[in-house]
Image (cartoon, grey):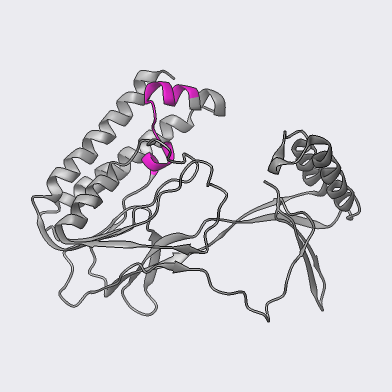
Amino acid sequence: MDKFKISSAFNYLNECLTLLCEEMDSVELLSCKYFELPTTEKGMEEELSDRIDVSTYVGEQALTKCASAFQDLFLKENQSGKVIKRHPGLICINDPEKMIENRLRQINQAKLDFKKIVLSISNNDARFELVHSAIPGLITLAAYRQIHFESDDPKSVRFTWMQKHATKTLTKEQALALLERSSNYSNPRMIDQASWQRLVESEKTRVVSLKSTDKLRIRRPTRVTPEVNVRFTNTHRYHVSGALPFFVLNPSKEIKLGDLNDFVASKPNPRKKEYDFLVDRIYLEKKLINYVKKATFVALVQ
């Protein structure tokens, strides 16, 4: 694998994105909204906000921002490279000749091809060095993002906020190995190394006390994200990521379009069962299942 192959694939993708932005100005725009979200700055990656304020733009101003969103592929000064900026939006256009639809399909295939080339480099460090020497400052995950669209005349397109959990199943031995690795971290959470290692040892003791047959999993809460909900009927609907503006091609006049409202975290339900946190750093969940009850213990591994 050489830099030329990576840069060539990316340049082709970038050219397709440029053509899309030019073609967006030549079609009949029926409606356009862009919902601007705050940018995560360096050092703020671990902050899970309980409120996200949304700034809404409409019309031509929104279209300009949507076009910029598709080409937002490079890291900017003071911007976090760990939390990629999301660009929810909605573009409704008449596209009878399928010019935009064909371009979107071309772009999405180019994104898949670029991703395939990058991921063919099995070693993570070598992959990072090669990609960023070929395309300095590129946010690869932003380049991978598909542009979603719908051309089958949905009844409504609305937005919502979604918060999911990333899960990973592991054995008792794997959990201990994870804690062992974390004991070598330097100055985590601004405490001295000796205190940190004592903390990890106490956590390992709790894991050691588990049975070898106990089921474990890490269930880490992820950052809340915008999603697009597309509905045809009450039983025929789907949702996709709202990380990029969503295209609705040739919609009917009766289509119902929604907005993305500010996110405000809901208050905990007092009736909901509370977890017994084993470790404040890792969401490590132990499940004991029988016919009567389930006991769950949660811990967080960073």
Residue shown at the point (63%, 78%) measured from the top left:
269
> Magenta stretch containing residue 142, yes or no?
yes
> Magenta stretch containing residue 4, yes or no?
no
Q: Which residues are magenta?
A: 129-144
What x and y, as percent, mark residue 22?
Answer: 13, 43
Q: Nearer the viewer, residue 114 or 225?
A: 225
Q: Nearer the viewer, residue 40 or 276?
A: 40
In the depicted structure, whether residue 298 falls above or below residue 108: below
What x and y, as percent, mark residue 258?
Answer: 30, 72
What x and y, as percent, mark residue 127?
Answer: 50, 26
Q: Quadrant of the N terminus?
A: top left
In the depicted structure, whether residue 99 falls above or below residue 32: above
Q: Is residue 96 visible?
A: no
Q: Is residue 101 left or right of residue 184?
A: left
Q: Is residue 66 visible?
A: yes
Residue shown at the point (35%, 48%) measured from the top left:
146
- The picture quadrant where one finds residue 198 is top right
Q: Main secondary structure of the magenta part?
A: helix
Q: Nearer the viewer, residue 19 or 279?
A: 279
- The picture quadrant where one finds residue 237 is bottom left
